[in-house]
Amino acid sequence: MQKKHQQHRNQIRIIGGIHRGRKLSFPPAQDLRPTADSVRERLFNWLGQDLTGHTVLDLFAGSGAMGLEAASRQAEKIVMVEKNRQVVNALRKSIDELQLRQVDLIYTDAMAYLNTQSDLFDLVFLDPPYVWDEQQWSDLLARLVDHLKPDARIYLEARKIPPLADYWQVEKQGKSGISQFRLLSYQIDRYKEMKSDSDGKK
């Protein structure tokens, strides 16, 4: 029974799109916790089932549950960022099995990616380790702004939702177990207004 339970824990199932029902394996790793099927189903009900034309960033890819789900729903481009080599190897195998040519898998740290790349995205998945503190969240969200298209949306999952600046509008929210999650929209006009006010006070 233990072996069966462990095997189940190390699998994800794609719940929608052209690869619906496919099961993919991932290795056990510290802080790796796939978003529950029920949460993903709710999220993609919020987002819409078809992501055609969307560019997507899965910044803490882990099991690949979010990025691969977006690919199954025909997002135009998905960048998946993961810093664990063993997990990256498993993700590469899943991407190859599903022949997802629109997925770009990058082996690096999340902040390193944001600091060195310039791609812009319509949708971002953020599910960092639960041990992240408020300062880490603040740094991440501040840096993320440079990678967002106007009206971009961000899915954020955490044990405790960090403080959010006024230019993040909460569209939807929920809770699953010890996880809280939010769907945010980026208010670029509000961001520019706040940045202008801040620069004027310097």
Image: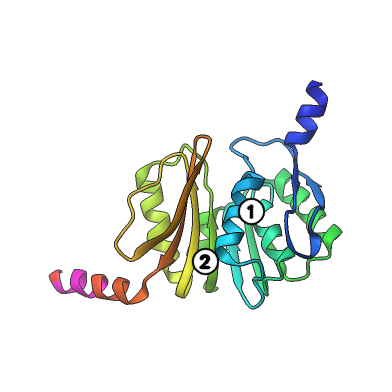
Q: Is residue 82 visible?
A: no
The N terminus is located in which quarter? top right
Q: Residue at x 71, y 35 (%)?
A: 28
In the displayed structure, 197 sits above or below 63; it is: below
Q: Find residue 116 and name its label.
A: 2
Q: Label 2's element?
A: helix
| Along the line of sight, the residue nearer the viewer: 26 or 4 | 4
Q: Main structural element of the magenta stretch: helix, strand or loop?
A: helix
Callout 1 crowding tier (Cα within 10 Å): few <14, some 14–19, many ≥20: some
Disc 1 on helix, strand or loop?
helix
Residue 3, image quadrant: top right
Residue closest to the far right: 97
Q: Which residue is mark 1?
A: 41
Q: Magenta segment: does it hold 198?
A: yes
Residue 30: x and y, percent?
62, 35
Q: Is residue 136 above or below residue 167?
A: above
Residue at image coords 22%, 75%: 196
Which disc is residue 145 wearing?
none
Image height of 180 relative to 49, above or below? above
Query: In the shown orientation, is residue 23 left or right of residue 68?
Result: right
User: Residue lying farthest left?
Assistant: 201
Front-most of residues 111 and 172: 172
- Tell whether label 2 touches label 1 (CB within 8 Å): no
Point out the frontmost of discs 1 and 2: 1
Q: Position of residue 32 (x, y in %)?
A: 62, 40
Label 2 sits on what residue type? Answer: Thr
Question: Is tag 1's residue or tag 2's residue first in the polypeptide sequence?
Answer: 1
In this picture, which residue range is highlighted in magenta?
195-200
Q: Residue at x 43, y 66 (%)?
A: 185
- Amino acid at the residue labelled 1: Glu
Q: Residues within 10 Å of mark 2 (few under 14, many from 20)?
A: few
* Magenta span contains residue 57: no
